[in-house]
Image: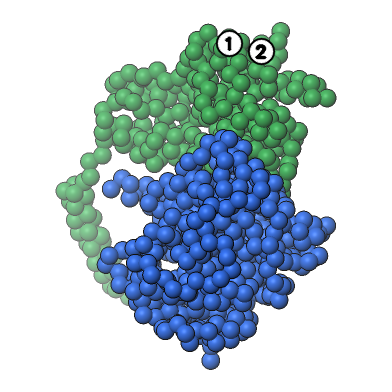
Chain colours: A blue, B green
Amino acid sequence: MLKTFKIGGVHPEDNKLTRAVRTEIAELPKQAVFPLSQHIGAPAVPCVQKGDVVKVGTVIAKAGGFVSADIHSSVSGKVAKIDTVVDASGYRKPAIFIDVEGDEWEESIDRSDSIVRECSLAPQEIIERIKNSGVVGMGGACFPTHVKMMPPKDCKLDCLIVNGVECEPFLTADHRLMLEHPDEVLIGVSIIMKALSLEKAYIGIEENKMDAVELLRGKAGDYPGVEIVPLKMKYPQGGEKQLIDAVVGRQVPAPPAIPANVGALVQNVGTVFAIYEAVQKNKPLIERIVTVTGKSVKKPANLVVRMGTPISQLIDYVGGMPEDTGKLISGGPMMGRPLMNADVPVVKGTSGVLMLPREDAVRAEERPCIRCGKCVSACPMGLEPYLLATLGEQADWERAEKEDIMICIECGCCQSTCPSRRPLLDWVRLTKTTVGGIIRSRNAKK
Amino acid sequence: MSDSILTAVIVLGIAGLVIGVVLFLIAKKFAVKTDPRIAQIEELLPGANCGGCGFPGCSAFADACVKQGGLKGMNCSASKPEVMEKIAAIMGGEVEAVAPKVAVVRCNGSCENRPRVNEYGGVKRCSIANMVCGGETGCFYGCLGCGDCVSACRFGAISMNPETGLPEVDQDKCTACGACVGACPRHIIELRNKNKKDRRVYVSCVNKDKGPVAKKACAVACIGCGKCVKACQFEAITLENNLAYIDFEKCRLCKKCVEECPQHTIMAVNFPAPKPVTASAEQTESESKNA
């Protein structure tokens, strides 16, 4: 009997069109664009000026606070300007533009294909390297990894849980990473275990990726304390709290509690790979795997893309945007964000580019709630989405706070399961944002 | 038979009398003393509970007014000046002169001026559209057109113009309570002085993008050229983040800036005929230029 999380969840069609497509290396862009806020926390502060010459791996923006991350150039060339660009949020944000010339790398980066197994660095040095490489959570939230690896003093971590779940339909970036770089992932796991002196690590993988489970299981014998845990398919298993529940059966209490409060540290496999590259190869986070897919796309692909490459270039690579495209999404269909145009650059959190056909993209007309309770049973956080949405509509923020709106993870299970096609997530998001603002201003007053 | 009816009448009569006397005594003993002026003032107030005065509702305003012992620093923008005078008479004080204000929509990004580049399929609420994406046009500062301000107005003063897709304020109905100002997620609506004969001059744009970007998104966007700042003799105009702003306290309504503005962003409304530069005329002018 495979493990999974206990409450809620839905089973969307997995549509992993690219599961057997090897990763290919995308061409260098002509101009790379680096938005300054690619992570949760303070935006990075540019440390280059117009006209500066940079190499691949040069720091172009420094962390702008404790919770923030450095940004490195992924290309070599000249800084064209520091201006604004429309990013995946749909708004114009400051960014650094670099005109690409050649492909010259910083000498300190190890570009060879050899796998470096030994790590002689002290724990503090490991975290320092992760910090200097600008590594952030690659699962989508983009929380700076070095901050996550310095848990509060009163929390005792006892296990690492690696997220190889990839429960979003369509996306296969993590799946391909595990198949093509299993050794690197496992070395990355042992590095994190060493840095935090953890005895135990679990790699959670859903049952639709049994090839990755077998492969990693075969190799995990060489790494003491690492266990591969196959999981039942269920969305949103990749959510931090759901994964902890599924793998070790612990429940994270409501915020401000974090996973560290129950002794668990969760890292995405993409992040683990980035940690390996940062620590063993001295290579900052300058590229990532992006799944470019869609039902009518000519040849969907998994591409290794340099940060800052415009998404339009990836779409050209897979045979152009299909004519029936109704919506272009950055990320997967459940948690992804619709894009205003295809000039948005790839950033640290871009896990996929999805082109949805018109018939799938257009929302069905909203009908009245029939009190079926499907949203309640689908909610993985045990909330009552229909109620939260109504409270949002009525602007009853106090009651919404009492109904625990703040623990919502915005997974969208409620909306996808609603037979009346009610825009529950829209309202819940609005309510959560507003209540969050009220709580912040109240705390600031204290 | 008649006995039992008589007994019932006597028993109930006595019981009623006793209870009545007890209740009368209790009411006397524990009477809550309220200032009669509170009720009087509340009677005069519009009773819309709009919150424009900064108090939760009209009774809270009346309460605070009596507690304070006067109208100092307090004003009900929804009431006519005579009402405030009556309240002042009750309280035995004077009314502070407050310049009447009106809500002004600072966006002229109509369907023609600001082409649509995107489609928003979510809930038709500005607050949600603003959170999910940048809106349907290339301007991330302008009106989203879903009408949060219309539903926020308790006086029926704002309506959507279906032709322009923008909200319009009925200046006679607007009480300057500020509900729409708070409802607009993009802070487009501002309360500005009504001025004599309702004449107003204001920058009808809140776009903070650089000139070329703003111009590409909207034909009547402020491009931050600063011509109006130079033209103004009263130092009423400031330029910040590529956006001009006219301070309505300093503005003398000379309209020099209106003539200078290359983008026709600055609006002059309710000025007399010889040079009719009202909102609608402004638009037709820019249209004919575009054509």
Residue A314 drawn at (x, y percent): 72, 57
Image point (57%, 65%), residue name: A112
Of callouts 2 and 1, the N-terminal one: 1
Q: Are marks 2 and 1 in contact (CB under 8 Å)?
A: yes
Placement of B118 over or under A361, stated as above or below: above
Of marks 2 and 1, the one in the foreground: 1
Q: Secondary structure at mark 2?
A: helix
Q: Residues within 10 Å of mark 2 (few under 14, many from 20)?
A: some
Residue A283 drawn at (x, y percent): 51, 59
Image point (65%, 13%), residue name: B260
* Identity, as a three-letter code, of the amino acid under mark 2: Glu
* Identity, as a three-letter code, of the amino acid under mark 1: Ala
Identify the chain of the residue marked 2, using the numbered disc in the image. B
In this rendered view, identify the residue nearer to me: A241 or B124: A241
Q: Is residue B260 left or right of residue A257?
A: right
Placement of A233 over or under A277, stated as above or below: below
Query: Residue B231: which disc?
Result: 1
Identify the chain of the residue marked 1, using the numbered disc in the image. B
In this rendered view, identify the residue nearer to me: A18 or B82: A18
Image point (36%, 19%), residue name: B96
Q: State whether residue A184 appears in this view.
A: yes
Q: Secondary structure at mark 1?
A: helix
Residue A137 drawn at (x, y percent): 49, 62
Q: Identify the residue position indicated by label 2 in the image.
A: B259
Image point (63%, 26%), residue name: B223
Q: Residues within 10 Å of mark 1 (few under 14, many from 20)?
A: some
Q: Is residue A200 left or right of residue B102?
A: left
In this rendered view, identify the residue nearer to me: A307 or A249: A307
Count of numbered badges drawn on the protein: 2
Residue A152 drawn at (x, y percent): 31, 63
